[in-house]
Image: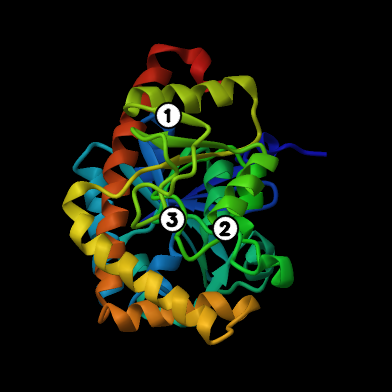
Amino acid sequence: GLGLSALATPVFWREASEERFIMTRFLPLSYTPEVAEALRIGGPLVALESTIISHGMPYPQNVQTAQEVENLLRERGVTPATIGILDGVVHVGMGPQQLERLGKLGLACKKVSRRDLAAVVAARQNGATTVSATMMIAHLAGIQLFVTGGIGGVHRGAEESWDVSADLTELGRTPVCVVCAGAKSILDLPKTLEYLETQGVCVAGYRTDDFPAFFTPHSGLPVSCRLDGPGEAAALVAAQRQLGVSSGIVLGVPVPDDLAAEAAVVEEATRKALAECEAQGVKGNEVTPFLLKRINELTGGESLRANIALVKNNCKVGAEVAVALAALQKRSPAAKL
């Protein structure tokens, strides 16, 4: 069968007014000129998911946030590649008009995981990519770094519901480094880390020995390795690529000190919501929706603002790693293998 490198081989190019269209053998990928040029010259690149735009917040706040995050990367010399699907075409990088359209569509967009990708493309529908689909497309496009808020995980009560995020299996089979604040504390974190270990995923702590739990900088659970700067993180990504390791990397970034106060409010609300969840006997796949709704109520909507600040902090770290990785690969061509 064809490997991923074969799948990503361009068959033809067509110039368009706003973008460059590349048809791979099985998957149409539309690159903005900015992303196509960064790929051509080996410049720093970071992939971004689109679910936060369509499902994370209302219009126009969603579009404004997406543009702020992209500009934060550009200011640091990194090309952003927001990934999403419009009319069945997978976009690797989105222009202002496309971000605007995605933002206005909102919940009318399909939430696309790996499972849904082919169906949405075949039906020429609109879709916002989750962590798993974003990782898959980023890898096909040749992008090694992806920044998001946090990954999914094993849900509490999974022994009854079997509710395990597709993010974890994607990390086990797709060699992309996901820069994030770990996983939310509403999840079963010990089981999440056990699952990642089984999948062969390197869980690295960025300047920490503890796995971050989103708004909690220290979960008390150890990471598999510690990285004390962007150079070390870039070296790890390059080494995995050279060795042909087919699994991904979780680069866990602890919440910074300047977000500590906001984070503490959200974390306290999370603890209250968990206690209410247990007291009310909420179980199975009803647990996560109950917790997210209750946390938002308890914080008066502040949890969303804190979430955005957390994503921006992860982007700053992701940008530093992307710059270091591009420099490393230019100095040492072997690191691109």
Residue 193: mark: none
Q: Amino acid at mark 3?
A: Gly
Corner quadrant of residue 119: bottom right
Q: Badge 1 is on which residue?
A: 226
The mark nearer the N terminus, 2 or 1, is 2
Residue drawn at (46%, 82%) of the image: 276
Instruction: Decide: few, some or many residues near mark 3? Use Cα within 10 Å; few <14, some 14-19, many ≥20.
Output: many
Instruction: Decide: few, some or many residues near mark 1? Use Cα within 10 Å; few <14, some 14-19, many ≥20.
Output: many
Which mark is nearer the camera, 3 or 1?
Answer: 1
Residue 190 in the figure: left or right of residue 60: right
Q: Position of residue 96 (x, y in %)?
A: 29, 63
Q: Is residue 249 above or below residue 127?
A: above
Q: Label 3 to label 1, Cα distance in Å?
A: 18 Å
Q: Badge 2 is on which residue?
A: 153
Q: Badge 3 is on which residue?
A: 150
* Residue 285 seen anywhere in this rendered image of the structure: yes
Residue 92 in the figure: left or right of residue 73: right
Q: Which residue is at the far right?
A: 1
The mark nearer the N terminus, 3 or 1, is 3
